[in-house]
Image (cartoon, rainbow, N blue to C red):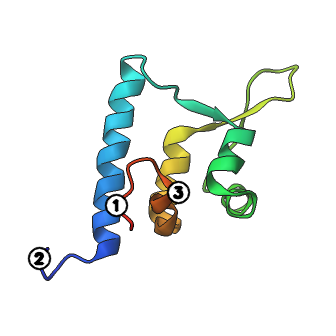
Amino acid sequence: MPDGIDRLQLLQIQAAVQAGYRKCEEKYGKAKPFMSLNQYYKKYGYGIGQNWIDAKIVNPIRQGKNTSKWQIRVEEAELAAITYNPELLCKEELKPCE
């Protein structure tokens, strides 16, 4: 590992690569661009997830006019995780943390 790059930067680079890969999956129909609010809270935790919503870092979107279902853009949630809580990256499937 070069002297100029620390573990946090490596995690952020890996997360950026994963985000690009996910974008390609969305483009070709392999992954969904939205997750439900419940999935969002399960993945990132209720406290952290609600803080991001309150700070308007992540914006929930109502699915339709006459429904109570809310969705979150996966891209927004992943960007928030990379930027504001990089230690959450260790919970991902392809994790560099040990």
Q: Quadrant of the C terminus?
A: bottom left
Q: Residue tagged by mark 2?
A: 2
* Residue drawn at 51 percent across, 57 percent down: 91
Type of amino acid at the residue the image marks with label 2: Pro
Numbered label attached to residue 96: 1
The reply to whether discs 1 and 3 touch (Cβ–Cβ < 8 Å) is no
Left/right of residue 36 with respect to residue 89 in the rendered view: right
Q: Are marks 1 and 2 in contact (CB under 8 Å)?
A: no
First along the sequence among labels 2 and 3: 2
> In x, y percent, where is residue 63?
74, 25
Residue 64: % across, % down: 77, 21
Rendered-image quadrant of the N terminus? bottom left
Distance from the alpha carbon under mark 2 to that under mark 3: 27 Å
**Residue sitting nearer the eye, 22 or 96:** 96
Mark 2, secondary structure of its residue: loop
Measured in 3D between alpha carbons, the distance from the residue under mark 1 to the one under mark 2, in whole angstroms, is: 17 Å
Query: Looking at the image, is mark 1 or mark 3 earlier in the sequence?
Result: 3
The residue tagged with tag 3: helix, strand or loop? helix
Q: CA distance from mark 1 to mark 3?
A: 19 Å
Q: Secondary structure at mark 1?
A: loop
Say what amino acid the circle numbered 3 marks.
Ala
Residue for badge 3: 80
Query: In the rendered image of this protein, does residue 93 appear above or below residue 21?
Result: below
State which tag comes first along the sequence, 1 or 2.
Answer: 2
